[in-house]
Amino acid sequence: MPALEDQPFSAPVVSSETAFDGAVWNVRRERFEYGDHELVREYVDHPGAVAVLAVDEQERVLLIRQYRHPVRMRELELPAGLLDVAGEGPCIAAQRELAEEVDLQAAEWAQLTDFFTSPGSNSEAIRVFLARGLSATPAFGRTAEEEDLELHWVNLDDAVDAVLEGRIGNGIACIALLAAQQFRNRDWVGLGPADAPWPRHPQRRD
């Protein structure tokens, strides 16, 4: 039986161009060879992102409620942000986002999980960090959809129940909460180091 894991594969690219230059996202059009065929696909060209599952001493997790216009929902989700600062490593980006979105810093950082959000339509790769040993930072001036963020400290098991009952639909939050519960049940054994390599990120492959 083949190993139970994704297999790296890169089809030969014949051409690549920006089909749409957007305010936040660009859409890339690529023609590539696959088997005996030459295919064309368009996808959101995404820099990737990081998210933070912050856990306090009572094993409560921090969820934020934020408006997301494409789905017309004020979702429960995790502090998160784009990897759009040149030269900034993923863990540093996660630390910045935790401070900017919820005015917190953490003494302990670990890699919780990596995944792709929607690999058929965009190149976004997400790394979720587990942050513990929390303390407050100076208040950050937030704008736009972040102006009315709500912070909710929730028992981890209650948050997982909300996922399983369909009350939380944000994909990043769902995956992170389920992963965190499993790691918690294993006494947090198996977490990755905060500076773990990220070879699956499309723009960070050597």
Image: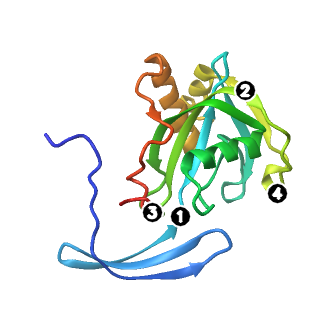
* 121 on left or right of 158: left
Q: Residue at x 52, y 82 (%)?
A: 19
Q: Residue at x 51, y 49 (%)?
A: 126
| Mark 1 Cα-neighbour bin, 10 Å: few <14, some 14–19, many ≥20 | many
The image quarter containing residue 72 is bottom right
Please say if 98 is above or below 200.
above
Which quarter of the rendering shows the C terminus?
bottom left
Q: Residue at x 19, y 72 (%)?
A: 35
Between marks 4 and 3, how big is the CA–CA gap? Answer: 28 Å
Residue located beneath label 1 in the image = 46
Between marks 3 and 2, how big is the CA–CA gap? Answer: 34 Å
Is residue 134 in sight in this rendering?
yes
Between marks 1 and 3, how big is the CA–CA gap? Answer: 9 Å
Please say if 172 is above or below 81.
above
Q: Nearer the viewer, residue 168 or 21?
A: 21
The label nearer to you, 3 versus 2, is: 3
Between marks 4 and 2, how big is the CA–CA gap? Answer: 23 Å
Say which label, 2 or 1, has the lower sequence index.
1
Q: Nearer the viewer, residue 186 or 29?
A: 186
The image quarter containing residue 132 is top right
Residue located beneath label 4 in the image = 144
Badge number at residue 203:
3
